[in-house]
Each structure stands twice: as structure tokens, then as C-alpha cells.
Image (cartoon, rainbow, N blue to C red):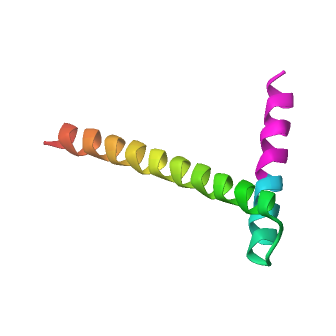
Amino acid sequence: MVGAVLVVVLVLVVGGCGCVVWAEHGGPGWVRLVARGTLGAGELVRGAARRRRRGISNRTDSSVD
């Protein structure tokens, strides 16, 4: 079950990346929409990773004192 979910997520990621490339080359409107969604999701994931890293480093720094 978990493997199937991971495969679906991988297919969505690869498809989204393909839409980003296609939109850069002037694809149709729906491709631009999917590309925007893909880029927005990427920014959300990147922001969450930054917050998590900051939280971990803050906890580590405070425990050293």
C-alpha cells in the first residue's frame, strides 16, 4: 500500500516537472496552471524543510549552553 502511494507521488512529481519544462517553452494554458501548482508545492516543501532545520538547529544550540 505504501509502495503504491509512493509510486503515485513519484508520477505526479515527474509529471509536474514535465509541465514546468513544457510551460517554459510556451505550452497550453492548462500546462501553465499545472506548472504554477508544481512550483508552489515545491516552495511549500522547501519552506517546511527550512523551518524544520531551523527548529532542529535551535534545539541543538540551546542544549549545548
Answer left or right for 38 relative to 14: left
Answer left or right for 15 relative to 63: right
Residue 32 among those drawn in magenta? no
Viewer-nearest residue: 6 or 43: 43
Viewer-nearest residue: 16 or 45: 16
Figure label count: 0
Query: Compared with residue 34, is residue 11 higher up or lower down, i.e. above or below?
Result: above
User: For the point 77% across and 40% down, which residue is it?
Assistant: 9
Which residues, given as a range, are shown in magenta?
Answer: 1-13
Q: Position of residue 56 (x, y in %)?
A: 35, 41
Q: Position of residue 52 (x, y in %)?
A: 41, 42
**For the stretch drawn in magenta, what is the main secondary structure?**
helix
User: For the point 76% across and 60% down, which residue is it?
Assistant: 17
Q: Residue furthest top?
A: 1
Viewer-nearest residue: 27 or 7: 27
User: For the point 67% across and 54% down, which residue is it?
Assistant: 38
Looking at the rendered image, the quarter that the N terminus falls into is: top right
Answer left or right for 37 relative to 8: left
Q: Residue 30 falls in which quadrant of the image?
A: bottom right
Q: Residue 60 falls in which quadrant of the image?
A: top left
User: For the point 83% across and 54% down, which residue is it?
Assistant: 15
Q: Residue furthest left?
A: 65
Q: Position of residue 34 (x, y in %)?
A: 74, 54
Answer left or right for 53 relative to 10: left
Query: Compared with residue 9, is residue 4 higher up or lower down, i.e. above or below?
Result: above
Q: Residue furthest bottom?
A: 25
Query: Compared with residue 38, is residue 29 higher up or lower down, i.e. above or below?
Result: below
Q: Residue furthest front?
A: 29
Looking at the rendered image, the quarter that the C terminus falls into is: top left
